[in-house]
Amino acid sequence: MRTKTLVLISSSLELATGLVLIAVPNLVANVLLSTGLTPAGEAVARVGGFGLFSLALACWPEGEGDNKRPITALFVYNLVAACYLGYLRIGGEFTSHLLLPASVLHGLLAVLFAHPAYKSVVDRDPVM
């Protein structure tokens, strides 16, 4: 899979998730965590949605130019998201059946981004 396609797929997923979090945060909490949100939780979830939306826009691929920073950002995000969602499910805090598939999806994306992210760090020009 081409790196640009991978960035586009990952950015699209985060864009959609961000928009849904902004529009109906309780739906995401119910589907992903099997629990509702307090009004304060809804506010925080919407801010998280703004962050995902912004991450997607910042990482959206443009032409064949430099994609080093978006690749690194999406690798780190997917790695941390996979670990945390897996922890929530395996740690027993939440019992939703969608937490593990979400964790696996983020883990798969992190694995796919690992080599391009490593190359982008190794190939980076030294800062003067």
Image (tube, helix red, strand yellow):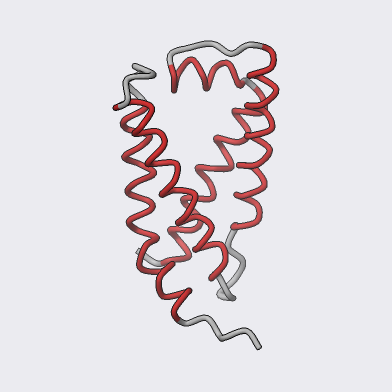
Query: From what the image shows, is residue 122 above or below residue 93?
Result: below
Q: Residue furthest bottom?
A: 128
* Image x and y of residue 116, in percent: 41, 69
Query: From what the image shows, is residue 101 above or below residue 76?
Result: above
- The C terminus: image quadrant: bottom right
The residue that appears at 43% across and 14% down in the rendered structure is 34
* Image x and y of residue 38, in percent: 63, 11
Left or right of 57 on screen, residue 110:
left
Q: Quadrant of residue 41?
A: top right
- The N terminus: image quadrant: bottom left
Q: Quadrant of residue 103?
A: top left
* Image x and y of residue 44, in percent: 66, 26
Left or right of 39 on screen, residue 29:
left
* Image x and y of residue 95, in percent: 34, 16
Q: In this view of the protein, which residue sits in the foreground, 1 or 69?
A: 69
The residue that appears at 56% across and 37% down in the rendered structure is 16
Query: From what the image shows, is residue 123 above or below residue 47?
Result: below
Query: From what the image shows, is residue 74 above or below residue 1?
Result: above
- Total marks shown come to 0
Left or right of 33 on screen, residue 63:
right
The residue that appears at 51% across and 19% down in the rendered structure is 29
The residue that appears at 50% across and 63% down in the rendered structure is 71
